[in-house]
Image (cartoon, rainbow, N blue to C red):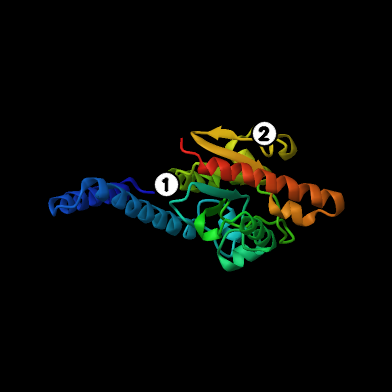
Amino acid sequence: MGEKWMKQVAEGMQDFYRRLTKDGYNPDDVKPALYEVERIVHMEQLRRQVLSCTDCSLCGHAKSRVPGTGNTGTPFMIVGEGPGEDEENWGLPLVGISGSLLTLILTKAGIRREQIYMTNVVKCRVTDEKGKNRTPAREETLECSKYLLRELEIIRPRVVLALGKVALQFFFPDMKTMSQFRGNVYDYNGIKVVPTWHPAYIVRQRGDALARSKREVWSDLKVAIECAKRNG
C-alpha cells in the first residue's frame, strides 16, 4: 500500500475531524466514527491490491485472487491456508465443502459468518502439475504474507483461529505439528492465536478419527470464542 495514498487518507480523516468538531459534534463521538470509516477505506484498498496482484508466480496460474471477507470490526478472525477450486471460482474464502463444514460448526456455536472475518494465508489457489490442490511452499506463503499482515494490522482482532499447519506456521514457523500445538493459546504481537485442524482435514476422516477431530475442533473453537470475549 503506497505511503502517498495512506497519507492522503490520514489527512482526509484529520480534515473531517476538524470540520465535524467545528460544527459542534462531540470529539468523543467523532473519533470512533472516523476510525471505522478509515478502517473500511484501508480494507477496500487492500482488497483491490489483492485482486490486481502480480507479485509472484502463483498469479500467472490462478484464475482469480481471493481476498478476505467479513466484519472488519470483529475481535475474531479465522485464517485458513489458501483458496481451493470452489473458492477460486467464487472469489470468496472458505466457501467450498470444508468452508461449509466450518460454517456449520460456527452456527452451532452461535456465530454467523458475517459477524467475523475470514481470510487465508495465500490469496491464490496453489496447484500441482495435474491441477490438484497442493500445500503452498514456505516461499509462496512468505511472498503472500504481506496481505495477511496488513489485514491483521487493520482489523486488530483479539483472537485468530488458525486452521491447519500452514496458518499455524505463518504465525509460528517453528511449530511443525498440529497435534502438538492445537487447542492451546499463543501470543502473536498481542493477538491470541488458537491453532486447530483445518476443516478439510475433518472432511477426510472416518470412524473414530472423524469423531475425535470433530470433538477437538469444537473444543478449540470454544477456547477461541472465550479469548474473543475478553478485554485486553
| Rendering coords of residue 211 (x, y %) | 80, 51
Q: Secondary structure at mark 2?
A: loop
The residue lying toward the viewer, choosing from 107 and 19, is: 107
Q: Residues within 10 Å of mark 2 (few under 14, many from 20)?
A: few
| Rendering coords of residue 57 (x, y %) | 58, 53
Q: Which disc number belongs to residue 141?
A: none
Amino acid beneath label 2: Met
Q: Examine the image and state in which quarter residue 130 appears.
A: bottom right
Q: What residue did someone put label 2 on?
A: 175
Asked if 30 appears above or below 178 in the picture, the reply is: below
Q: Residues within 10 Å of mark 1 (few under 14, many from 20)?
A: some
Residue drawn 29% across the image and 48% down it: 4
The residue lying toward the viewer, choosing from 137 and 159, is: 159
| Rendering coords of residue 69 (x, y %) | 50, 58
Q: Secondary structure at mark 1?
A: helix
Residue drawn 63% across the image and 50% down it: 81
- Residue furthest to the bottom: 89
Q: Examine the image and state in which quarter residue 106 appears.
A: bottom right
Query: Does the image show residue 79?
Result: yes
Amino acid beneath label 1: Ile
Give the Cα distance between marks 2 and 1. 26 Å
The residue lying toward the viewer, choosing from 23 and 14, is: 23
Q: What residue did someone put label 1 on?
A: 154
Considering only order in the chain, which callout, 1 or 2, is on the residue closer to the N terminus?
A: 1
- Residue furthest to the right: 207
Asked if 108 appears above or below 218 in the picture, the reply is: below
